Amino acid sequence: MSELSQITTYRPGQGVICRIESIEPGGYGAVVVAGKLPPPSEGQLAEPPMKAFVPSTEPLEIGQNVPATFVCMHNNRALMTFAFMLGTTETIQLSTASDKENAFAIWVDSYPSNQRVRRAIDLFMPAVEGKLLHELKCANCDSKKLLADLELAHFTGCIKARSEEKKSRSALLIINGRVVGAIYGKKDAQETYPVDKAIKMMGIDLLEPETLLTVYELPEGVVLSMAALFLGCPIAKDANKSTADYLDHALVSMKLAGETGCVTISQDSELVTTILFVYQGSLVGVYNIPAQSFSEESAPVVQETKEKNNATIEAHILPVHLLSDAITFGYKLSGAFA
């Protein structure tokens, strides 16, 4: 069966049963063993089992059958979300959106949590030297038109906003005109907001004339790597392994599989102090949050972290499906005003 026919047979949100076959970064390799596909017609050969990737931080056994929800196909391999109940949500059943948009909605709603959303907007690195940078006040621009223009221009970078009236700060991480990460915070507020709600709340602030805006470009590899904090799969930790071992495991596994993702490092604090960016398996840079500085030379940081061996480390990956034509990746930038 071709990839195209598999896409039209399985729909986003459809429940299936997967048999776990191997351990992979962020989850497990599997095959679909039960679903709602029609049986082959007389004389037609049965198709081989569909291969799948099932994200999970819970330990699963090789050979175990688990319920899962179909998201989308890429290179004849299905992306699933781990599901405790078969079927789909009422939202998807009633949706009039395209399968590509529904696939993204399922991914966001069913598996990833809003990792690190509670962190300050300093988590988003500043502009890289030589890239486009604009600073302006909403009173001097049409913020709705600005976001619509950035969406049409397939802008890749960051938008930060500061409202002194609401004592709020917010930021959007954008790839090709679509939002793949968002943070919204208010002074003394402890609430954590999911990405879609953070986008809406920032949109409200952008309607205030005194809100200050900063718009700047960032390298695509950096943006996609950081998007893993919001939309990616965490790589599970082995409690018996050291910090250095986990860091080695995360970087080597991402390199071998050509994964895009990031590694966060917290030194002597619960707050993340350093982010390592991994793009298509290669380390492309490191961001020092307290210093607000970016460097393409990440090897010294990796070595120092291994030697100290006492940092808190988390690694996240973006499944390759999310970066393919099989899914509409990210929220509409202009949707901040919807």
Image (cartoon, rainbow, N blue to C red):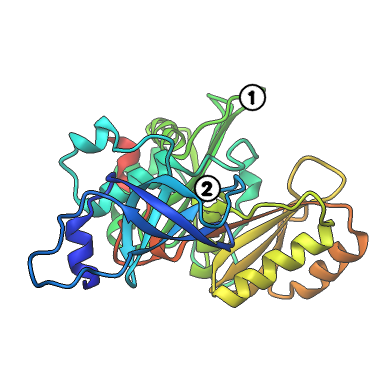
How many residues crowd mark 2 within 10 Å: few (<14), some (14–19), many (20+)? many
Where residue 302 appears, as percent x and y from the top left, is 79, 68
Q: Nearer the viewer, residue 37 or 134?
A: 37
- Residue 250 sits in quarter: bottom right
Q: Secondary structure beneath disc 1?
A: loop
Q: Is residue 286 above or below residue 83?
A: below
- The residue pinned by badge 1 equals 190
**Total marks placed:** 2
Query: Looking at the figure, which quarter contains the C terminus?
Result: top left
Element assignment for label 2? helix
Task: Please tell me which of labels 2 and 1 falls first in the chain.
Answer: 1
User: Disc 1 residue type?
Assistant: Gln
- Left or right relative to 122: residue 183: left
Taking depth in this image into account, of 29 and 278 the one nearest to the observer is 29
Is mark 2 in CB contact (under 8 Å) with mark 1? no
As shown in the figure, which amino acid type bears the numbered disc 2? Phe
Who's the residue at 54% across and 49% down the image? 56
